[in-house]
Amino acid sequence: MNAQSIVYSASALLFSPLLLGVINRVKAIFAGRTGQPLLQTYYDLSKLFRKGAVYSTTSSWVFRAGPTVGLASVLVALAITPFGRVPALLNFPGDLLLLAYALGLMRFFTVIAALDTGSAFEGMGASREVQFSALAEPAFLLCLAALACKTQSLSLSTIISRMNFGLWAKDGPALAMIAVAFMAVLLAENARMPVDDPTTHLELTMIHEVMVLDHSGPDFAFILYSASLKLWVMGALLIGIILPVRTGNILLDFPATLLGMIALALLIGVIESVMARLRLLRVPQLLVGAGVIAVIALILILR
C-alpha cells in the first residue's frame, strides 16, 4: 500500500458516479434533449441518503443486508483493482480470483434480496440475472486467464503494470479480442444496453432494475453507488488493457488513465444511443460469443 494507491481509491470513490452522468449526457445529446445535469447522480445520492427506508412485512434481514453487503463487496473489488500503473491497495498472487468472487458475492446478495420480497416480478428479474451471469462469468474469467498467461502473473496489479504498447505490437489480435469480450461482459454486468436498459421501469424485459424496485432511501443509495463503483472497477481493468500509458510520470499517467475512463463512459453512451436492447433470447448468444472470443484469444496466446 502506498500514497498513490490511496489517492486512486479516493478518486474512484469520488468520481465513479460521474461516469453515470457522462453516459446520461451523451444519450441526451444524441436524443436532442437538454438532459440531466452532469452531476445528477450526486444529487440523487444526496437526496436518497436524506430519506428513510421502507420495508415490507414479508421481508427479512436478507432484504436489508443486500445493499450493504453489495457495497462492501464492490469496495473489496475496488481495493484489489489497479488503476493504470498505480497498484491496488491490496495486491497479491491470485487476487484476480478474489475479484471474481467479490463481484459474484455482490450479485448473489442482490438476487436473494430480490427473492426475499416474495414478489414474482422481482423473482423474474432475479432468475434472468442468474441466467445471464452464468454465461458472463466464464467469459470474464477466460479474459483474466488469457491476460495472466500473457503476463505470467496471477496478480491484477502486475498484469496491468506489464501491459504496454509492445505487447500490442506483438499480440495485437489476441489483446483486441480480449478487449472486445471484456467490453461485452462489462455491458452485461453493469446492466447497460444492449443487454438491459437502466432507465426502464415496469416492463417485462427488465433485469437489474426489477430486482431493486422495493429498495428505498439509503438502501437504494447504496445500490446506486455500488453500481457506479462496479462500472469503475471493470472500466479501470479495460482501460488498463487498451490504454497502457507508461511514461513513468504519475502526473501524466494518472490523468491519461482518468481521461480513458471518461472516454469509456462516452463510448457506452454512444452504444446506448445507437443500439436497441436485444431480445432476451439474443442476450445468451452475445455472452456465449464473448466467451468464444475469449477462448480464441487464450489459444492465440498459448500457441
Image (cartoon, grey):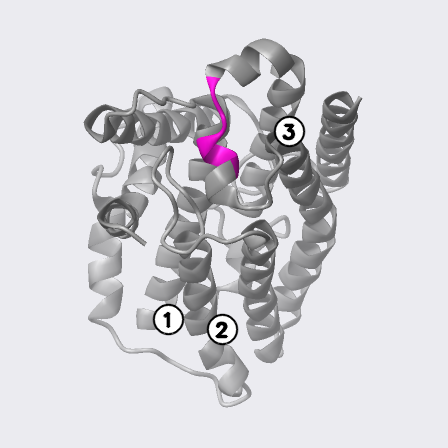
- Quadrant the N terminus occupies: bottom left
Badge 3: how crowded within 10 Å, few (<14), some, or many (20+)? some
Q: Are marks 2 and 1 in contact (CB under 8 Å)?
A: yes
* Residue at 61% over, 66% down: 108
* Residue at 53% over, 82% down: 62
Mark 1 or 3, nearer chain start: 3
Q: Which of 54/243 is in front?
A: 243
The amino acid marked with disc number 2 is Gly
Mark 2 or 1, nearer chain start: 2
Percent across and percent down for residue 17 are 30, 47
* Residue at 69% over, 55% down: 128
Where, by quadrant of the figure, is residue 182 drawn?
Answer: top right
Say what secondary structure mark 3 lies in.
helix
Where is mark 3, residue-wise?
Answer: 150
Where is mark 1, residue-wise?
Answer: 219
- Per the model, the C-alpha gap separating discs 2 and 1 is 9 Å
Location of residue 128 with respect to 4 vertically, above or below:
below
Percent across and percent down for residue 185 are 61, 39
The amino acid marked with disc number 1 is Asp
Where is mark 2, residue-wise?
Answer: 66
In screen coordinates, is 257 left or right of 288?
A: left
Mark 3 or 2, nearer chain start: 2
Say what secondary structure mark 2 lies in.
helix
Q: Nearer the viewer, mark 1 or mark 3?
A: 3
What residue range appears in magenta?
A: 159-164
Percent across and percent down for residue 44 are 25, 55
